[in-house]
Image (tube, rainbow, N blue to C red):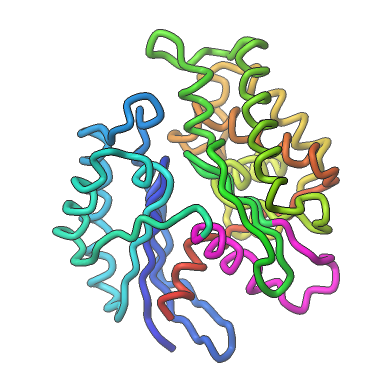
Amino acid sequence: MTRVAAIDCGTNSIRLLVADADPATGELVDLDRRMTIVRLGQGVDRTGRLAPEALERTFAACREYAAIIKEHGAERLRFVATSASRDAENRDDFVRGVLDILGVEPEVITGDQEAEFSFTGATRELTGRTDLARPYLVVDIGGGSTEFVVGDDHVRAARSVDIGCVRMTERHLVHGGEVSDPPTEEQIAAIRADVEAALDLAEQTVPLREARTLVGLAGSVTTVSAIAQDLPDYDSARIHHSRVSRARVREITEHLLHSTHAERATIPSMHPGRVDVIGAGSLVLLAIMDRIGAEEVVVSEHDILDGIAWSVA
């Protein structure tokens, strides 16, 4: 076993995994897995820069994670940064801050690299499953972007497009500095149009409709699963490898998009940091399922973070 630490810093959240990895058996044993909503991508789509307060929230989480990594004695650490830090003009400020706190430079990876990690993390443990037909389409709906990866044992094609839940919310649902409560039909239609255009782009390089199993990753998808199961709180064990039908995703999406902030905040399994962006995230998932004709989505709690950990091991 090799004790490794992996950090995935996205547009909406920063996540840590400390695990013991055994490449010979394919076993990854969690020691600590946690997530903090830092909204690093706050305003990036509009300004092109990382906001000072967003950087400070992220650095505060990094300081907390540094203590956890030290406590567990991880031998290796890899820090991967995705969409928001890839797009920002002042990403050097972010890089310097992380290096000072954790002693490693964040790797601002490309969308294609992000897709590779997501696929590995989501599918490595599916090997040998006879109830899930191949090829898989792994869809990672993040804050700033969504990754599409088709593959069997290995990636065949991948594409990253800019239709994350935070980006869609800030682009279409914010008016006068406030998120619409609830959104108008025109705003919802604008998100759907953006997503459809992005799916057209993705299909230029990724054969989305060839997939036999849709595997959905990240907070928007796992939250939809928690709502579908009517969980009294967020339960990772019950969410992991759950299946949600397209009809149920449609029903949940309609409810989220036509409810108020206060109503969404009362959902027991809802993370406070997702209340304003979950409507857009669920709409992205529904549009994908409609496009490829998927009757269900297999939900995975294992994603890019696990892929990063395996790359270190």
| Segment colored magenta | 113-137
Count of numbered circles on the image: 0
The relative height of residue 136 versus residue 24 in the rendered view (above or below) is above
Identify the residue shown where x is 25% and y is 54%: 62
**Residue 162: image x %, image y %?**
53, 38
- Comparing 179 with 81, the one in front is 81
Residue 289 painted magenta: no
Rendered view: 42 above or below 216: above
Extreme residue toward the left, this view:
100
Quadrant housing the N terminus: bottom left
Question: Where residue 55 sits: x, y (%)?
Answer: 24, 41
Q: Which part of the image, by quadrant, shows the C terminus?
A: bottom left
Residue at the extreme front of the image, as rendered: 204
Q: Is residue 198 placed above or below 114 in the rendered structure?
A: above
Q: Residue furthest bottom?
A: 24
Is 15 placed above or below 73 here?
Answer: above
Q: Is 126 one of the magenta-colored residues? A: yes
In the picture, measured across the screen, residue 58 lies left or right of residue 220, that is: left
Query: Left or right: where does residue 50 sit relative to residue 46?
Result: left
| Residue 128 lies in quadrant | bottom right
Q: Which residue is depicted at the point 47% across and 39% down?
A: 144
Percent position of residue 141, x then y? 58, 44
Q: Is residue 94 left or right of 119 when viewed as pictured?
A: left
Q: Does any portion of residue 238 appear in the rendered image?
A: no
Task: Residue 170: tell me if it is visible.
Answer: yes
**Which quadrant holds residue 189?**
top right
Name the residue: 81% across, 66% down.
134
Instruction: Decide which of 163, 12 is in the foreground and name it.
Output: 163
**Percent from the top left, x then y, of residue 311?**
46, 75
Displayed quadrant of residue 76: bottom left
